Image (tube, coloured by chain):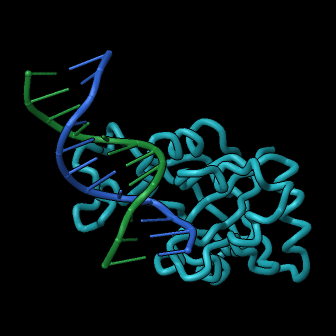
Chain colours: A cyan, B green, C blue
DNA sequence: GCCAACGTTGGC
DNA sequence: GCCAACGTTGGC
């Protein structure tokens, strides 16, 4: 069992969108960074915990908790020439990018990035390192526990 | 909108 | 394989 932080722009897919989806589950598409892809492909397992992070918005932060709900499979948007995520070098025979399904589990309270920066237990988070912009990054058990305690209250 | 930091591309 | 140029990310 591992833990991850995954970034989404809420204008595109928000945590509330996932809560409203059938089975509270959506396909995580659009990852176009090899390091992030490799985490999804090689290290994630069904049931892993996810911090659902809102980026590129007025108040960036952790919007809710989720879990990995499928193994890796080809990201459909790489084959769609009308998609901004289209990759002309990808083919169904040799896909380059992958998705996993993500299921929302708990909403809790919104935890702003600014607050995360003030918490000693989180100072080593990949997210908080200078220049870090990985859209999928590992979270330690200690970081996960600290964040769950901070957002606790209200089952989704 | 700005800009620092990072990743990718492509010439050599 | 180097590295300059370019494109992207993402907080502010």
Q: Residue at x 83, y 62 (%)?
A: A119
For the C terminus of chain A, the image quarter is bottom right
Is A122 on the left or on the right of B1, as rendered?
right
Is A123 on the left or on the right of C9, as rendered?
right
* Callout count: 0
Is C6 on the left or on the right of A31, as rendered?
left
Q: Position of residue A52 (x, y in %)?
A: 67, 66
Q: Residue at x 86, y 65 (%)?
A: A148
Q: Nearer the viewer, residue A133 or A20?
A: A133
Q: Residue at x 70, y 45 (%)?
A: A45
Q: Position of residue A104 (x, y in %)?
A: 71, 71
Q: Nearer the viewer, residue A5 or A70?
A: A5
Is C9 on the left or on the right of C8, as rendered?
right
Answer above or below: position of A131 versus A62: above
Q: Nearer the viewer, residue A56 or A21?
A: A56
Q: Nearer the viewer, residue A63 or C10?
A: C10
Q: Residue at x 85, y 48 (%)?
A: A141
Answer above or below: position of A76 versus A88: below
Give the quarter of the image for residue A19. bottom right
Q: Position of residue A100 (x, y in %)?
A: 57, 54
For the N terminus of chain A, the image quarter is top right
Give the quarter of the image for residue A60. bottom right
Answer above or below: position of A9 versus A89: below
Q: Position of residue C10 (x, y in %)?
A: 52, 65
């Amino acid at each position: 069992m591992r833990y991850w932080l995954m970034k989404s722009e809420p204008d595109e897919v928000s945590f509330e969108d996932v809560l409203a989806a059938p089975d509270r589950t959506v396909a995580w598409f659009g990852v176009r960074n090899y390091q992030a892809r490799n985490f999804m492909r090689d290290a994630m397992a069904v049931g892993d915990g996810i911090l659902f992070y809102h980026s590129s918005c007025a108040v960036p932060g952790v919007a809710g908790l989720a879990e990995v709900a499928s193994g890796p499979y080809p990201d459909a948007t790489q084959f769609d020439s009308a998609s901004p995520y289209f990759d002309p070098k990808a083919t169904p025979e040799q896909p380059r990018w992958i998705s996993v399904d993500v299921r929302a589990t708990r909403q809790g309270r919104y935890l702003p990035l600014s607050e995360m920066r003030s918490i000693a237990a989180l100072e080593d988070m990949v997210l908080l390192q200078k220049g870090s912009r990985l859209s999928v990054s590992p979270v330690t058990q200690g970081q996960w526990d600290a964040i769950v305690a901070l957002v606790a209250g209200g089952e989704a």
